[in-house]
Amino acid sequence: MAKSLVTGGAGFIGSHVVKHCLALGHEVVVLDDLSGGFEDHIPDGALFVKGSVVDHDLVTELFDEHKFDYVYHLAAYAAEGLSHFIRRFNYNTNLVGSINLINESVKHKVKCFVFTSSIAVYGKGQLPMTEALVPQPEDPYGVSKYAVEMDLKAAHEMFGLNYVVFRPHNVYGENQNIGDKYRNVIGIFMNQIMQGRSMTIFGDGTQTRAFSYIDDVAIPIARSVNIPAAYNEVFNIGADKPYTVNELATVVCEEFGVEPNIAYLSARNEVLHAYSDHTKAHSIFGSPTGIDLKEGIARMAAWARVVGARQSQEFGNIEITEKLPDGWGIKRQPAL
């Protein structure tokens, strides 16, 4: 039986990857510090270890004890917009934590290291974004993700560590942390509606994203270790059709049976249009599920109604407060 480590396995995408790994017959160990996930998201049958990838000693102990065949690395603090203001935290969590895992994977001869990157690595690339583009990340989150991608390539060339890199985008679905006000616009919209509050949109809402239902992302990630043609390759993964944030708001409101009540806030520093080409992924992993935005929103909304609204969590260690977006309600430091 294959033994797999899934970091971030109590989180949104990670918990779904755990589910599909278990279905493939893997023995699964989940490492998660619960900073953005929930223990009750972890499927039955997985061993849960509470802790962080930043904890070098803990990571070393886990690899020594379990002799993993595969590592699925999904643990990250994935708030692109916030990453400008938490640079040290971002790089420590998303980059240094990843290197702890890569080092141990090399030393323990892991068969394949599966890394969940992001289309944030592309920055303002031409559309649709393809794997052939040279990444030009625009924010510290994207920089950290691309740095890990480059390190995996170097580790493969130096030590023979096989890897698969996925660049998903705007993923949504059941188990998403709808109480996180810094990221995941669909969860934010649903949480605001269930609390009877206005839906907030940065800018005029014409920015576009291809919102990706979780099954189109988690299933290929889990299966990738069994597909040799995927090894040492990079894949865009997710939905093909982009929508404006205004269009998204309309779909969510229709599902909840409410009229749109939108508060438009000052635009923040973000890429206006982001969607990618998935020809390469489809050629290796097959066709996507066919779940469109309307059906995916309906599935997530049914789950959200059960769990109910959640209070937005504050990020308590903002390192830079200059130019913070208005909608986050974080007190700025006075000008020097």
Image (cartoon, rainbow, N blue to C red):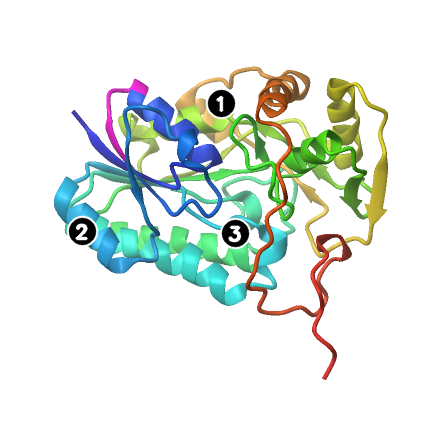
Task: Give whichever of discs 1 and 2 has the lower sequence position.
Answer: 2
For disc 3, the marked residue is: 134
For disc 1, the marked residue is: 215
Q: Give residue 232's quadrant in the image.
A: top left
Density class for disc 2 (Cα within 10 Å; few <14, some 14-19, many ≥20) is few
Q: Which mark is residue 225?
A: none
Density class for disc 1 (Cα within 10 Å; few <14, some 14-19, many ≥20) is many
Q: Mark 2 is on which residue type?
A: Glu
Q: Secondary structure at mark 1?
A: helix
Q: Are marks 1 and 2 in contact (CB under 8 Å)?
A: no
- What is the CA distance from the residue labelled 1 to the residue labelled 2? 32 Å
Q: Is residue 24 magenta?
A: yes
Q: Residue at x 45, y 49 (%)?
A: 76
Q: Is residue 265 visible?
A: yes
Q: Residue lying farthest bottom? A: 336
Q: Residue at x 23, y 58 (%)?
A: 57
Where is residue 246 shown, x and y percent of the image?
80, 34
Where is residue 43 shown, x and y percent of the image?
36, 25
162 or 221, which lies in front? 221
Q: Is residue 223 visible?
A: no
Q: Is residue 47 magenta?
A: no
Q: Which residues are magenta?
A: 23-29
Task: Give whichever of discs 2 and 3 has the lower sequence position.
Answer: 2
185 or 71, which lies in front? 185
- What is the CA distance from the residue labelled 1 to the residue labelled 3? 28 Å
Q: Secondary structure at mark 2?
A: helix
Q: Mark 3 is on which residue type?
A: Val
Q: Are marks 1 and 3 in contact (CB under 8 Å)?
A: no
Density class for disc 3 (Cα within 10 Å; few <14, some 14-19, many ≥20) is few
For disc 2, the marked residue is: 61
Q: Mark 1 is on which residue type?
A: Asp
